[in-house]
Image: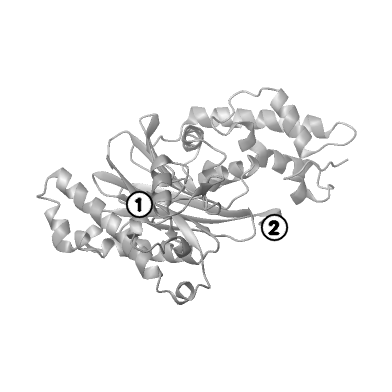
Amino acid sequence: MGAFLDKPKTDKHNENGVGNGLRYGLSSMQGWRIEMEDAHAAVANLPGVLKDWAFFAVFDGHAGAKISAHCSEHLLNSITSGEEFLPSSIAEFETDSEERTINKIKKGIHAGFLRLDESMRQMPEVASGEDKSGTTAVCALISPTHVFVANCGDSRGVLYRGGGIGFSTQDHKPVNPTEKERIQNAGGSVMIQRVNGSLAVSRALGDYEYKNVEGKGPCEQLVSPEPEIYVERRQDDDEFLVLACDGIWDVMTNEDLCAFVRSRLLISDDLEAITNHVVDTCLHKGSRDNMSLVLITLPGAPKVSEEAKKKEQELEDLIEKKVTELCKQEGQVSIAQIMQSLADENLPNLPPGGGLTSKRGFVDQIFRKLRPDCANLDNDAYSSDCCT
């Protein structure tokens, strides 16, 4: 069976919340992978002196779920327990220059990542060599005035602002020139786009078998725990922030995902439902990985539009009509054949970024309703098995 299941596990874990003028929803799915190695964190209101701040993160584990789970529970505290986030330091933010404050916060985030990575070495399973897992991490600290996004690995954060991409983190891959140089300076190599032909990311928390080069600091190892930190001053037209693992980004570009999310926000304010729709769409687009997504809407997010809802209903009515006609035809019919027939129709008003694939789940629902006699419907959702 290898690293994949015979059929994907499509049950989802969901959370949502509100705080500090933000709303969030998240969805995670195991998918085709044998194990669920993703983890996440979401805190809309931080405690104490940081009560006006929020924290969100996605962790994409590999070689096990131990490190990703630990990071989801401890990264926030590792960051905020540093001297940069002591009450006295927070009080200075009011009088310090913006540049000085930003540099302090960046320093605190950086130190928090390295502190956590060093502390996890002492975990019994890790110290014994029994656990060799690691994880990527992308997190966002949102203050009343700024968005701080820290990335370590190939999970990604994207801010959508004023109808376009405000910024995106950059993936840390072994083939990137600066990453490759560090790997080679540590005595390693990049083969088949992987560290020593094995690990697909060049920065991660954990993965200690790649962090034992004598004479090199923690950020000079084959795999570095150092985050790349992005800072954006908040603006009135900030719409939403997406944090997601590569199970999402492998099959959707930044532009496609943001266009799709924005189109869904125009027809629903249910962020859990929107993130579920994204995950399902990525599954049907061919993602074979675990999938996790956190969607944070900012004050400039689009509001539900009656016109958009009307167009969506018209589209679904048309799809239902077409599927009904196809199911009434004699002979064999399959989900794959139905999807191909719908694609040939060039249907109007399909969701941008998601296209017809984003309506696969809706087509499945209609098919099940019209052909309840069909066997193996679950399998048919992911194959071209026919039903007569």
- Which label sits on residue 383? none
Q: CA distance from mark 1 to mark 2?
A: 32 Å
Going by the numbered disc 2, the residue's amino acid type is: Gly
Quarter of the rendering containing residue 339: top right
Going by the numbered disc 1, the residue's amino acid type is: Pro
Whether residue 273 is visible to the viewer of this picture, yes or no, is: no
Of 248 and 344, nearer the camera is: 248
**Residue placed under numbered mark 2 in the picture:** 2
Q: Residue furthest left?
A: 95
**SS label for mark 1:** loop
Residue at figure coordinates x 33%, y 40% from the top left: 299
Say which quadrant the N terminus sits in.
bottom right
Quarter of the rendering containing residue 76: bottom left
| Mark 2 closeness class: few <14, some 14–19, many ≥20 residues within 10 Å | few
**Residue placed under numbered mark 1 in the picture:** 227
Quarter of the rendering containing residue 114: bottom left
Residue at figure coordinates x 72%, y 40% from the top left: 366
User: How far across and how far down the image is residue 215, in percent?
Assistant: 33, 62
Say which quadrant the C terminus sits in.
top right
User: How far across and how far down the image is residue 242, in percent?
Assistant: 43, 44
Left/right of residue 374 with respect to residue 29 in the rendered view: right
Left/right of residue 72 with respect to residue 275 in the rendered view: left
User: How far across and how far down the image is residue 267, in percent?
Assistant: 50, 36
Of 253 and 306, nearer the camera is: 253
Of 67 and 248, nearer the camera is: 67
Q: Residue furthest right?
A: 331
**SS label for mark 2:** loop
Residue at figure coordinates x 54%, y 54% from the top left: 28
